[in-house]
Amino acid sequence: MKRVYVDEKWCLGCHLCEYNCAFANSGETNMVKALKDKEICPRIRIEEDGKITYAVSCRHCEDPVCVKCCISGALSKQDGVVKIDENKCVGCFTCVLVCPYGAVSPAEGHAALKCELCLENACGFPACVKGCPNKAIVYEER
Amino acid sequence: MKNFVIVGGGVASVAAIEGIRSVDKTGKIYLVSGENKPTYCRPLISYYLQGLTDFEKMKYRPDGFYAENGVELVFGKAESIDKDKKTVKVGEKNLPYDKLLVATGSTPFVPPFNGLESVEKKFSFMTEDDAQAIDNAIDGNSRVLIIGAGLIGLKCAEGIAERVKEITVVDLATRVLSSILDADCAAFMQRALEEHGVSFILGDSVAAFDKNVATLASGKTVDFDILILAVGVRANTSLVKDIGGAVNRGITVDDKMQTSVNDIYAAGDCAEGYDASIKGSRVLAILPSAYFQGFTAGVNMAGGDKSLTDDMPVNAIGFYGLHSLTAGAYIGDTYEEKTESGIKRLFFDGDRLAGFIIIGEIKNAGIYTYLIKEKISLSEEDKEKLKKSPTLAIFGSEIRAKKLGGVV
């Protein structure tokens, strides 16, 4: 299956992926309206190791530990994609506690947030990939 | 074709079904459940009382799960095992097994309090039925007494705090959540509940009940309408114990989840498996362990080969948006960071991270959990990076390329 892959060699650390992700998942059609003066909750984040930067998002693991540990049955793997059912999630954040990549985010008073490859939102294609100016993030089969 | 029997309808049973089916697509699976319903998420009963979920959403798996996996549900109580004939007695039926999983869970422990029989409205807090009964019993005038300031008692308190007149929590321990938090961290979580009107009497215990009054060992008295007993749980081990199987605090299992009796496995709250964080056996009565153990048992029952050697305690608990995540063992050198809004404690045992307690800023904490579980050797530089924040920076470019550029 296709996944989002990251090559840190090309990452500029521009954080655009974070903004594009937050916008794609906001349900809004206007980026300014979606993001201006708001604390954004992207499902991808830029990390730094010295001068190196790289993006981290859900790896859609072959054997996802978050799904096994989910206390509400909200996380599941469907056709290779690790999905979260926001209606079932109670925000206990056991997934945050066990994800080896830090790829599930706690959101205030809300279900946990994670990358679903933009398959469920209006974008339909990973927004982080689409907007990456240096092709450091790609969506492909490996 | 193999015949599998699973006794118990909790999370370990679902995991076992998924484990069996990862190896054997055709064998017959009988699931014996004492609760007349499909597997649901027991840790969610407090959220139910808060109105944040309902019994439909609390189903652990989609409705078609049992049918799709060829599971025949048998509602009833498993009374005994005949290990020679290899059958399990459920009412009039004797279910034959090639491989049997005992996943019978645990039962709330009720100490023999003086006068307990005089209390009219008393409840445990473990099942949907318990939650439903409490839901029906409470109203805006209820004075609730909860015995036990552990995970169960406190989640119950949170679940009903906005719906009752007052809640008093009594515990013999001198801090709340004593099984997972040290004193400072416990005080943090206690405060979150106190801000919502929950009162605590710690380091004290009930000497006697007389109808609606509890007299404590200190001489204090607490008036109440509703009593909730959340002292602790005991593993349900009798099925295996009765046939001479090895039992300690739970049913003794090896890393394949095999009990001391041939072809009988155990998993979940009833089992005592290996805890890698203390390098010893322990009942890990938490949902992740129930899943790991159940899945491991299922694979091995079906003829696969899987060992569970890295299980350890992990706990996520929160009250009113203040979250606490804990993992591993609290041994070795402590690094602490304390602010107004949270605490971070990392425990380094030599070159390894042994455990942590994080309250408040919980982002990326799973990276810490991974380092504990995988026993990753850490340089002093790594430790410094980790103290700042848990990121993939400690792995370096080469390993990171595999993690972020490969299939994992």
Image (cartoon, coloured by chain):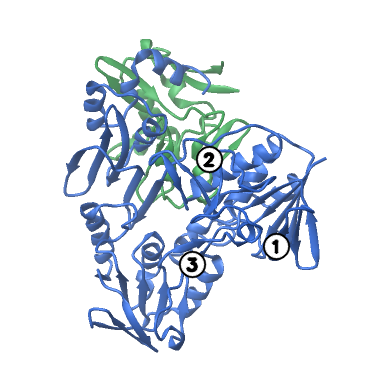
Chain colours: A green, B blue
Q: Amino acid at mark 1?
A: Ser
Picture layout, residue B262 above or below residue B140 = above
Instruction: Write down the residue under mark 1.
Output: B80
The residue that appears at 38% across and 73% down in the rendered structure is B163
**Can residue A86 be seen in the rendering of this structure?**
no
Amino acid type of the residue that numbered disc 3 sits on in the rendered structure: Pro
Mark 2 and mark 1 on one chain: no
Mark 2 = which residue?
A67
Left or right of A11? Residue B273 is: right
Share a chain, discs 1 and 3? yes
Name the residue beneath numbered marker 3. Answer: B108
Q: Position of residue B70 (x, y in %)?
A: 77, 46
Give the distance between the C-alpha atoms of the residues marked 3 and 2, in whole angstroms: 27 Å
Which chain letter goes with mark 2? A
Would you say residue B181 is visible in this rendering?
yes
Q: How far apart are labels 1 and 3 at the CA level?
A: 21 Å
Q: In front here: B338 or A44?
A: B338
At label 2, counting other C-alpha atoms closer than 10 Å, the crowd grade (few under 14, some 14-19, many 20 or more) is many
Question: Residue at left 23%, top 83%?
Answer: B219
- Residue density around tag 1, few if under 14, some if 14–19, many if 20 or more, within 10 Å: some
Tell me the quarter of the picture where residue B403 sits. top left
Taking B40 as reference, is B330 above or below it? Answer: above
Letter of the chain that mark 3 sits on in the rendering: B
Which element carries disc 3, helix, strand or loop?
strand
Instruction: List x then y, in percent, for residue B127.
Output: 54, 65
* Secondary-structure class at tag 2: helix
Instruction: Pinpoint the chain carrying mark 1.
Output: B
Spot occupied by residue B212 in the image (x, y as percentages of width and height): 37, 87
- Residues under numbered marks 3 and 2 in contact, where contact means CB atoms less than 8 Å apart: no
Please tell me whether mark 1 sits on a helix, a strand or a loop.
strand
**Is residue B72 shown left or right of residue B292?**
right
Q: Quadrant of residue B164?
A: bottom left
